[in-house]
Image: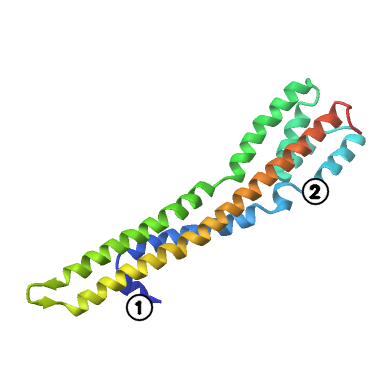
């Protein structure tokens, strides 16, 4: 591996850094975007049970808010449960925007890496071609420099694609997963509002 890095030249280092950042983001998002962390399926029935047992206390709200991202939305709704339906929905929307921001954390960076990596590979290709053509002189050509130019061009082109493809696939996957969470959380929040205001049992 080290021989490949040496053969690829200095243009490979930005791609290596980008790949490390992309791997860190993928690992962090895969851990953070788990259903039990974002929107546990048993949370709404649990909140309904609490409401049936006599209401929600400040301690319960704090526990709910720390439970999950969906818990933050529910806590916001319950904290405004004595207000009108419109105020409750506004509180949910405000909390929902903050939750959406948390869900999308680092994804723009991952998308940027997926877009920029092929361009970094292309930069390495251009630099390799410059070295390649620089090997030709009036007295012939430098075979070692010619070979190095080809190595720099090809390795950087391949590295750009290798970094970009997984980054783009995971970026699209996480974006889709976030969108799914947001829709599910919105539906559950609407159900909770209906329960609070007596429209649903």
Q: Position of residue 82 (x, y in %)?
A: 81, 23
The percent position of residue 11, horizontal first and vertical second, equals 31, 63
Determine which quarter of the picture holds residue 54: top right
Please name the residue shown 61% across and 54% down the image.
173
State whether residue 23 appears in this view: no
What residue is rendered at 71% in x and 38% in y? 72
Q: Is residue 182 visible?
A: yes
Residues packed near mark 2 inside 10 Å, few (<14), some (14 to 19) or many (20 plus): few
Q: CA distance from mark 1 to mark 2?
A: 50 Å
Q: How is the image coloured?
A: rainbow
Whole-percent x and y of residue 19?
45, 61
201 sits to left or right of 22: right
Image quadrant occupied by the C terminus: top right
In this image, 48 relative to 127: left or right? Answer: right
Residue identifier under label 2: 41
Image quarter hosting the N terminus: bottom left
Q: Considering only vertical position in the picture, is 34 above or below 151? A: above
| Label 2: which secondary element | loop
Q: Earlier in the sequence, mark 1 or mark 2?
A: 1
Q: Which mark is residue 3?
A: 1
171 in relation to 143, above or below:
above
**Left or right: 11 in relation to 130:** right
Q: Are marks 1 and 2 in contact (CB under 8 Å)?
A: no
Residue 121 occupies which quadrant of the picture?
bottom left
Q: Which mark is on residue 101? A: none
């Amino acid at each position: 591996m080290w021989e490949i890095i040496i053969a690829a030249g200095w243009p490979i280092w930005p791609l290596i850094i980008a790949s490390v950042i992309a791997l860190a983001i993928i690992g962090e998002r895969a851990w953070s975007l788990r259903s039990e962390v974002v929107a546990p399926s048993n949370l709404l029935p649990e909140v309904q049970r609490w409401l049936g047992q006599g209401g929600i206390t400040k301690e319960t709200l704090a526990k709910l808010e720390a439970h999950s991202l969906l818990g933050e939305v529910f806590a916001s709704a319950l904290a405004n449960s004595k207000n009108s339906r419109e105020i409750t929905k506004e509180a949910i929307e405000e909390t929902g925007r903050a939750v959406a921001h948390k869900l999308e954390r680092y994804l723009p960076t991952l998308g940027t890496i997926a877009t920029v990596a092929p361009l970094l590979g292309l930069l390495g290709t251009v630099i390799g071609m410059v070295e390649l053509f620089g090997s030709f002189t009036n007295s012939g050509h430098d075979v070692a420099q010619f070979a190095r130019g080809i190595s720099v061009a090809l390795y950087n082109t391949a590295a750009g694609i290798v970094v970009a493809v997984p980054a783009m696939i995971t970026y699209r996957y996480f974006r889709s997963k976030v969108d799914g969470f947001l829709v599910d959380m919105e539906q559950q929040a609407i159900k909770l509002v209906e329960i609070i205001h007596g429209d649903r049992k």
